[in-house]
Image (cartoon, rainbow, N blue to C red):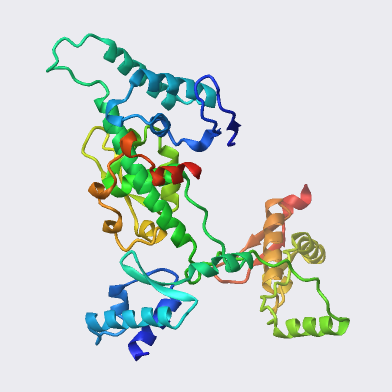
Amino acid sequence: MTTAYAPDSTFTDSSFVVELAAFSGPLDLLLSLIREEQVDIYDIPIARICEQFVQRIRTLGLNEAAEYLEMAARLIRIKAQMLLPRGDAEAWEDPRAELVRRLLEYQQMREVVDVLERRGEERRNQFARAYLPQAPAAPQAPLALSLAELLSAVDRVLRAAKPASMHEVIPRTIDIPGAITIIRSVLALRARILWTEIVDHGAEPWQILSTLLGLLELAKGGELRVLQPRPFANVEISRDAAGEAA
Amino acid sequence: MTPLAKLLEAALFASARPIETDELAALDPDVSRAELQSALDELRERYDVDGHGVELVEIGGGWQILTRAEYTEAIERAQLAARPARLSGAALETLAIIAYRQPISRAEIEEIRGVAVGGVLKSLHERGLIDVVGRAEGLGRPLLYGTTPIFLEHFALRHLEELPRADELAIALRLPTRDAEPAVAASETE
């Protein structure tokens, strides 16, 4: 990034090497020119400095930087203003005044930078407690252990692991076709049966449900009729005469 | 050492950041400020006189135990600790302006430096050296920046007033007649 440039013999006699990153801005470059030329900052020979500034930014390849170009334009403008005839000596304002003010301000700031740089460097050379940044994790050592150790480790893990308490679900799907087969076979023997006769007393819910749904299915198909004389009474199931006829 | 000096030493040892005097005072409510100060002085002298590898430093209104500079090389070579990266010239210039002119807007900083400072401000903010301290009244209500306690820590300053006053700074460029500026020569060689 910091490309060194050879001195341009056309505008300077002193031999020096400038680095591109050596200047932190146009004011910095301008100040260094003023120092090099050993001129009074309150009486800047603007034409000379302006010319050198323009030449320098060309040499440095800084002419892409808008800030340097802006400063170059400002210098040329001041140079032009200096050439204008000064009619009234009283009212004449030095067009360099604003530039000088900025240069002085900038220079003052640079002196603070020197102080900060020195202090910062001093502090940098002292470590505080626990400054240590998080050390990168050491690479894992290859695993070295015997089979017996491995097995005992597995054993410890298994003993430590609590058996997971699980609710056991027994799959019992409702069996409607099965129930239908039973009902049909019973009805084939007897024309009329009672609910309690086809559902055992200790029947599981799924059996009851299967029988009920089978009954309803057959009743819908017209194979049988379901009759309950009064609420909660035993349900009578009888062959449907019409269905039979069909 | 007095018991109080030992207590302070333990507390300062336990902390990675400077501990403010108020916080140190909270260690023992029965202790007066004068006693606290004399215990701190005792501890500092202890470190200085007995030849310790660390010293007690006053930073940013607080106190901190730091290693002595002469051991930095060895510590860093052994990779026990690493010095933080140096701030760039642009960052230092921007910090210097903020330190003296705070609260200050970005446009004002750019006016003094003559270059755009958006990126620099962002990285300074990320490092915790500056913070937004308010908004200006003017057009667009631009953000105003100021320095933080970390700024003081970074430059081992007790407070901002420790920086040279503006009128103490050498007045700009000396005339060619009384030249030989050593400060300038130093900054150019870097």
Q: Residue A131's x, y, as percent?
A: 51, 67
Relative to the observer, which residue lies in front, B159 or A232?
B159
Horizontal side of residue A172 vs B26, given as left or right = right
Q: Position of residue A14 (x, y in %)?
A: 51, 29
The residue at 22%/8% (across/down) is A85
Look at 32% across and 77% down and name the residue there: B24
Along the line of sight, which residue is nearer the eye, A13 or B166? A13
Quarter assignment of residue B143: top left
On the image, the x and y values in percent for residue A73 come to 38, 18
Image point 82% across, 80% down: which residue? A150
Q: Is residue A185 above or below residue A160?
A: above
Q: Quadrant of residue A215?
A: bottom right
Residue A211 position within the rendered picture, expressed as x and y whole percent measured from the top left: 71, 65
In which quadrant of the rendered image does the N terminus of chain A lie?
top right
Give me the residue at 75% from left, 82% from top.
Answer: A158
Vertical placement of residue B98 versus A149, above or below: above
In screen coordinates, is A31 left or right of B71?
left
Q: Quadrant of residue A119?
A: bottom left
Q: Nearer the viewer, residue A190 or B159?
A: B159
